[in-house]
Image: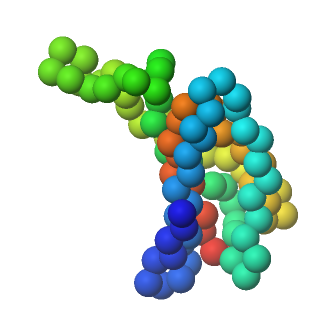
Amino acid sequence: MAALNKAGDKLVLFCVNRSLDTDMPARIQIDGFTTEGEASIQTLRGSSITDANDEDNPEWVIPIQTEEALAKGVLLHIFPHERVAVITLRRR
């Protein structure tokens, strides 16, 4: 799923890799949205798809923030299996 902010300068992609064992490589380029610099990526990380936070382990599943460089407006990213990622792109 994708969402564009009101100003039209930030695009957020919500991505899910539901595979239990396969990481998925992707080439992301959005027609009509020229990006710049780096993509901001926040990925929920746990050891298993069944993991959950609780009062004993409140940080069992946590978001990990990373930045990845764009090459000529293209993001090459590998989506880890059993993960949810939010990618933020900024318009050039």
The residue located at (84%, 64%) in the rendering is 72
The residue located at (70%, 32%) in the rendering is 23
Task: Classify 36 as above or below 21.
Answer: below
The spot of residue 54 in percent (x, y) is 21, 23
Q: How is the image coloured?
A: rainbow
Q: Residue furthest top?
A: 56
The spot of residue 21 in percent (x, y) is 65, 24
Pick the front one: 88 or 1: 1
Q: Residue furthest right?
A: 72
The residue located at (18%, 15%) in the rendering is 56
Pick the front one: 40 or 17: 17
User: Is 77 on the left-hand or right-hand side of 80?
Assistant: right
Q: How many marks?
A: 0
The spot of residue 63 in percent (x, y) is 42, 37
- Quadrant that contains the N terminus: bottom right
User: Is 80 on the left-hand or right-hand side of 82?
Assistant: right
The residue located at (55%, 46%) in the rendering is 16
The spot of residue 79 in percent (x, y) is 66, 39
Q: Is residue 70 something that shows in the picture?
A: no
Pick the front one: 87 or 16: 16
Image quadrant where residue 9 sits:
bottom right
- Quadrant that contains the C terminus: bottom right
User: Is 67 on the left-hand or right-hand side of 26?
Assistant: left
Q: Is residue 25 something that shows in the picture?
A: yes
Image quadrant where residue 80 sits:
top right
Task: Classify 42 as above or below 23.
Answer: below
